[in-house]
Amino acid sequence: MTIIHLVTHSGGFHADELLSSVVLTRLFPQAKLQRSRDRQWITPAADKIIYDVGGSYDSDAQIFDHHQRPGPLREDGQPFSSFGLIWAHYGRDYLAALNVPEDSIETIHAKFDTKFVLPIDLLDNGAMEPSVAGPLSIMTLPALLGSLKPVFDDTSPSADNDAFLTALPIARSFVEALIGNFAAKARSKDIVLDAIAKAGMSAILELPMGMPYRSALDQAEAAHIMFVVHPRGDEWTLGGIKLSNDTFDQRADLPAAWAGLSDAALENASGVKGAKFCHNARFIAVASTREAIMKMAEIAVLEIA
């Protein structure tokens, strides 16, 4: 039977049912989103998907709540929120609806679950404290989405629903942008692996355009590569390679004498005609031609030899 109702609870909202709604409204765009705790709405039926309300988890009956005791757990014993349950059952279909290639769906489904869904599950269940984000806790996605709730003295009877509907497309933009980035990384991997093979034992990796390259470098165990060059518009860039995604430290910095310089000053310091800019933090430089950027890259390699 066709799904004609997507049912979650009324009142204040949290990230888990909001993000569940992102997935379900994409898959069932003709279904009406109903926010209610009325028994008639939260009673399972073939034409409904009920989530984050109802006191039961039964995928066959299309009800996905996690507030009951005991609540549903992942295979490793960590708790699900409604978002985790919805992602487990509908995430692959959602990725297909976003035109993620079939051969990448399982990988991206698992990656998104680990990096995005699981933290939402843990926070919603109190299994992880917001304080783990330190001073950035107010900037986490659950906190930002929570800031869209109505203020305490908004007495409009539709305030909660209006806020939920305002937050929904904002949440969607974050989810679909991240999945788009994961899909792009999957597309880029073969291109980068081919470029690594062409580079051989050179410390300079040349790519045909700016693209994600870190996972391919790790896969190829190409620890000898220190810098990456690629065209950007009518210019070329030279960049360092971070040691990991958790630090700004690099395998190698650009020469200290270039830091913060541009145009003629950088040309004089580097001895390269066409050198245009080097960031003060020495992680990126720009030149007007491929010839100039490759000369700069070769100089940078010699400085660390």
Image: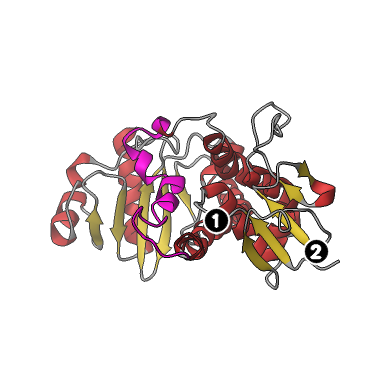
Question: Which mark is on residue 47?
Answer: 2
Residue at 69% from the left image edge and 44% from the top image edge: 65
Q: Is residue 221 left or right of residue 225?
A: right
Mark 1 against mark 2, which lies toward the viewer? 2
Q: Quick one: label 1, few (<14), some, or many (20+) residues within 10 Å?
A: some
Residue 247, placed above or below residue 213 = above
Q: Front-most of 143 and 249?
A: 143
Instruction: Say whether residue 133 is magenta.
Output: yes
Residue 98 is at least partly visible in this image: no
Q: Quick one: label 2, few (<14), some, or many (20+) residues within 10 Å?
A: some
Q: Is residue 111 left or right of residue 89?
A: left
Residue 37 is at least partly visible in this image: yes
User: In the image, residue 246 lies at what x, y percent?
Assistant: 42, 35
State which quarter of the image contains the C terminus.
top left
Q: Which stretch is magenta?
A: 131-157
Amino acid type for the residue under numbered disc 1: Val
Residue wearing tag 1: 175
Dot 2: element: loop
State which quarter of the image contains the N terminus.
bottom right
Residue at 70% from the left image edge and 32% from the top image edge: 73
Q: In the rendered structure, which disc, 1 or 2, sits on the residue that comes first in sequence?
A: 2
Q: Front-most of 18 and 93?
A: 18
Residue at 62% from the left image edge and 41% from the top image edge: 81
